[in-house]
């Protein structure tokens, strides 16, 4: 089964155990631990006596997960070395980027990184400068990951662009509201007719694939992205994902999501000042907007489905504003969007 698949394992450990692991493996004595929300792992902010803050993560650690974790953390450090704010790894006392341990809960992987300051993009004011910064950072992530090796083990997840139609098909049964269903059907139809036929031929690389508005931190004073989080969904796939996902999600807080999409694309295009920037090909520019519609359809369909579970509040939070955004983007003049994207990315 691929790592990151439909039935991934969770790991929850206490503050006491986390503090003990930090002392034993990292030689640091936390003054305070603050639990952060995590879908599968234990994640905590760690405050130290010298005013430094770190982030500690303990995840389930099967041998396959261990290889995938090395690959992901290596990518984060590779990007950090290129100036992307991913939060550098803090090595363990013996100099390792990750630590493999046997806990009562089972085998686990520990990682410690720099804490990054900022507020989540979904609660920041979506100014034009901030939208451009989203695109610029996404372009830098894409350029950095272009030279990162393909995954050493089979990784995959239902959010992948390549699985858009199958994921919506397997969750849409939970969408009972006729108005929501109509929006989803329209987005799926666009993806099926415009994107799906060319998707297998588009350029691929390693992609972050989850640059959404809760995985990007913002320095609100400077109106720029100050943190890129959560490399857990990294896969090898169509590289347009790393523009389509942030451009769609950045627009969820904007009055005009279509304009926000174009501003994010503009920022990506401006990343051309940086070494090894990815210049998208004509075929990619032609479908990136409709690919984003597919991704929002997956978000709406999956979280509507999961809202039936005991994680209902989290599910609703993850998809709030999606339907409105999708509705506005489907109504946007597609010809104008394509012309605008060509001007900014071509
Ligand atoms: N380096 C960091 N600096 C600041 N905050 C961080 C950092 N890493 C993680 N966080 C915080 O911890 C939370 C969980 O981290 P992350 O998103 O990486 O975990 P996750 O297991 O993928 O969780 P989920 O999928 O539920 O978002 C983030 O939403 C963020 O609030
Ligand atoms: N990929 C999901 C969240 C899981 O990180 C989303 O788009 O809501």
Image (spheres, rainbow, N blue to C red):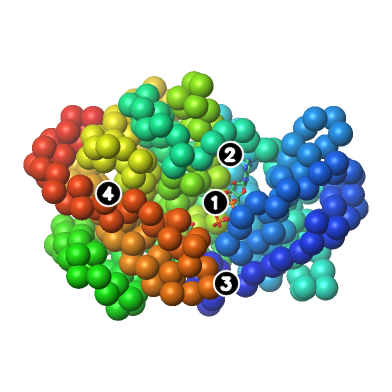
The answer to whether the beta carbon of the residue marked 4 is less than 8 Å from any atom of ligand 2 is no
Q: Which residue is depicted at the point 53% across and 28% down? A: 219
What is the CA distance from the residue labelled 4 to the residue labelled 1?
25 Å
The answer to whether the beta carbon of the residue marked 2 is less than 8 Å from any atom of ligand 1 is yes
- The spot of residue 227 in percent (x, y) is 55, 36
Looking at marks 3 and 2 on the same chain, the residue that comes earlier in the sequence is marked by 3
- The spot of residue 118 in percent (x, y) is 57, 33
Local crowd size for mark 1, using a 10 Å CA cut-off: few (<14), some (14–19), many (≥20): some
User: Which residue is under mark 2?
Assistant: 86
Q: Is 81 placed left or right of 249 in the picture?
A: right
Which mark is nearer the camera, 3 or 4? 4
Looking at marks 2 and 4 on the same chain, the residue that comes earlier in the sequence is marked by 2
User: Which residue is under mark 4?
Assistant: 325
Quarter of the rendering containing residue 317: bottom left
Res. 231 mark: 1
What is the CA distance from the residue labelled 3 to the residue labelled 1?
15 Å
User: Which residue is under mark 3?
Assistant: 8
What is the CA distance from the residue labelled 1 to the residue labelled 2?
9 Å
């Amino acid at each position: 089964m691929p790592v990151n698949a439909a039935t991934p394992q969770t790991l929850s450990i206490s503050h006491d155990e986390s503090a003990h692991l930090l002392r034993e493996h990292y030689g640091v004595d936390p003054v305070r631990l603050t639990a952060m929300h995590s879908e599968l792992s234990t994640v905590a902010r760690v405050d130290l006596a010298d005013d430094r803050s770190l982030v500690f993560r303990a995840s389930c650690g099967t041998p396959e997960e261990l290889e995938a974790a090395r690959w992901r953390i290596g990518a984060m450090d590779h990007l950090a070395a290129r100036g992307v704010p991913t939060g550098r790894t803090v090595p363990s006392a013996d100099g390792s980027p990750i630590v493999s341990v046997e806990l009562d809960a089972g085998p686990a992987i520990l990682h410690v990184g720099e804490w990054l300051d900022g507020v989540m993009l979904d609660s920041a004011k979506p100014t034009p400068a901030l939208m451009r910064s989203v695109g610029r950072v996404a372009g830098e992530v894409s350029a950095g990951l272009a030279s990162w090796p393909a995954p050493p083990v089979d990784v995959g997840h239902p959010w992948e662009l390549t699985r858009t139609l199958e994921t919506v098909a397997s969750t849409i049964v939970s969408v009972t509201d006729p108005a929501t269903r109509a929006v989803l059907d329209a987005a799926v139809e666009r993806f099926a007719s415009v994107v799906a036929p060319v998707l297998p031929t588009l350029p691929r690389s390693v992609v972050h694939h989850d640059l959404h508005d809760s995985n990007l931190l913002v320095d609100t004073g400077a109106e720029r992205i100050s943190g890129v989080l959560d490399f857990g969904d990294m896969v090898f796939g169509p590289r347009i994902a790393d523009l389509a996902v942030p451009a769609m999600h950045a627009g969820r807080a904007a009055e005009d999501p279509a304009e926000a999409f174009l501003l994010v694309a503009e920022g990506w295009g401006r990343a051309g000042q940086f070494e090894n920037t990815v210049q998208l090909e004509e075929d990619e520019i032609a479908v990136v907007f409709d690919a984003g519609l597919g991704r929002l359809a997956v978000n709406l369909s999956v979280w509507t489905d999961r809202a039936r579970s005991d994680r209902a509040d989290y599910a609703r939070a993850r998809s709030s504003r999606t339907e409105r955004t999708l509705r506005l983007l489907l109504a946007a003049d597609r010809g104008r969007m394509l012309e605008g994207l060509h001007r900014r990315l071509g």
